[in-house]
Amino acid sequence: MGLFTRRTGERERRDELLSAYLDGQLGTGERARLEAQLATDPALRAELEALRHTVALVRDLPQVPIPCNFILLRTVGVRPRPALSARSRRAWAAPLLTAATAVVSLLFVVVLAGDLLLSGVGGRAFAPAAQPLMETEAPRVALEPSPGSEEVVAQVEVEKVVPAATPLPTVAEVPLEAVASATAEAEHYAVETPEDIVATVPVEGDGLIEEPAAPALTSSPPVAEEAVAAPAAPATPEGVAATMLAGGGGPIEESAALAPSPGPIVGGEAAAAPTALATATVMPERGMGSAEPTPSEVGEAAPRVVGGEEPETAEGGPGAPESEVAELATISPWQAPEVILGLTALGLALATIWAWRVRRQ
Amino acid sequence: MDEAALISAAQQGQVDAFNELVLAYQQQVYNLAYRIMGDPASASDATQEAFISAFQSISRFRGGSFKSYLLRIVSNGCYDELRRRKRRPTTSFEDFGEVDEDANPAMINGHEGPEEYTERQEMAHVVQAGIETLPPDQRITLVLSDVQGLSYQEIAEATDVSLGTVKSRLARARGKLRDYLRSQGELLPARYRLE
């Protein structure tokens, strides 16, 4: 090993002398000594020739043509080291996105846990806690008029088409001009079709309206022929009337809590005038419920929309089941933040993966 | 406009003046990068980066050889890239492809026939492969000296080392390349083989 190292060292010193000699970089004394050795040492001479040949080959390498011009754009002066800055941004992106993903995911978990706790998964222990929310939410959703509906209501009131406590009028009792005017107004703001705007109010035996459920007009059984509808009196502060359609003895009662609905209501169909009211409730009524609630009952009931005891479907008929109704009512306030946070966390996670992959490259 | 005036204008921020210098030196800069890096793509990247860097730092150029200034920048860039590849090897040199020299009539000397041209290309492949076996510092020194024709002093300035270091690196590089060419003798055309 020592001999090999020594020989390697000697060889390197010899090559250094020969290389410098080829380039004319030796001093006068060194060059004279080397030339004397070369004259007497054929092996050293052969090494010198091999080295000279090697240098000649390198110098004989052909020029490689340029693939393109490398002129700079005029913007290079205001764009310092673009590649480096881009790489630097990518380097920061990965940890930043990781932290953001962690924070959003944590937030998502917290909101989800809060939702599960408050909504009482596996039991209804917290169900009452959700009721006040419904009390405030339901009337707003069900009865809040659209910009168009307020005008319609005002017009109906001025013309006194239907006094507040009068018996429910028939379609024929509604003045045609009021109908036309309100319809035109409503169509101008056309938010929903008449069929979509029916808000129904479940009827309990005592006339109180239960918590809202999904509308199920199309799936509900036929409503009694004598069902009444009215562009009812303004029973809410907004002047929104509640119209109740009561199925005579049927398992499902449909009630339409409508904004001023001067539109025609034909027979048992819960068709209403085009208003911008949100669809409210279809609730199964208990068997002993009043088949034909009076207008006064409707007037009292409509604005209260207070959840009493939870209704049960008498015959399992169509319409939203009770459990679904309760679930929807309790989960809905949490759904928006949950969905937003969940999607944000997912998007951030994907971006984080991408950022780390780019950084590793 | 002479080189000094172009440099002065470039120092005032005139990109057009600097581009005149680019056109004058891009062949040498690219050739140096190609011989050090061994593939066209890396050589193009190194050349472009070198010109951008040269323009951005031209205010610090205090006279002397502008060619040495450029070659210093590009050789430093190539050295950094080779060191980076050594730390984090991702792609072998073979994956970059090579210059299709048959498709480059500019590489054909006017006085050599097709057979001589082909043999020279074969020799160039073997020598280039030998250069790429050298460590980065020796490789750069060899190319600066024997491809670009820089003096020891210019190499010392370009690579920020002493004259003695240049002499030593160059001797080692030449010795290793000689040994490589001897070992690959059968790949070289007969007239290029070492004895």
Image (cartoon, coloured by chain):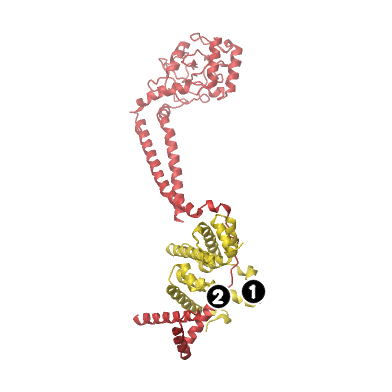
Chain colours: A red, B yellow
Q: Is residue A59 left or right of residue A325?
A: right
Dot 1 alpha-carbon crowd within 10 angstroms: few under 14, some 14 to 19, many 20 or more: few
Could you tell me which secondary element the residue under label 2 belongs to?
helix
Element type at marker 1?
Answer: loop
Disc 2 residue type (three-letter): Arg
Report the disc number at residue A88: none
Relative side of A187 to A355, left or right: right
- The image quadrant that residue B29 belongs to is bottom right
Which sits in the foreground, A302 or B147? B147
Image position of A85 with respect to A257: above or below: below
Q: Which residue is mark 2?
A: A59
Q: Residue at x 53, y 10 (%)?
A: A162
- Chain letter for mark 2, please: A
> What is the crowding at mark 2: few (fewer than 14 residues within 10 Å), some, or many (at least 20)?
some
Say which chain tag 1 marks.
Answer: B
Q: Most extreme residue toward the bottom, as rendered?
A: A40
Q: Which residue is mark 1?
A: B109
Q: For the point 44% across and 43% down, which residue is it? A: A346
Position of residue A249 measured from the top left corner of the image (x, y, whole percent): 47, 16
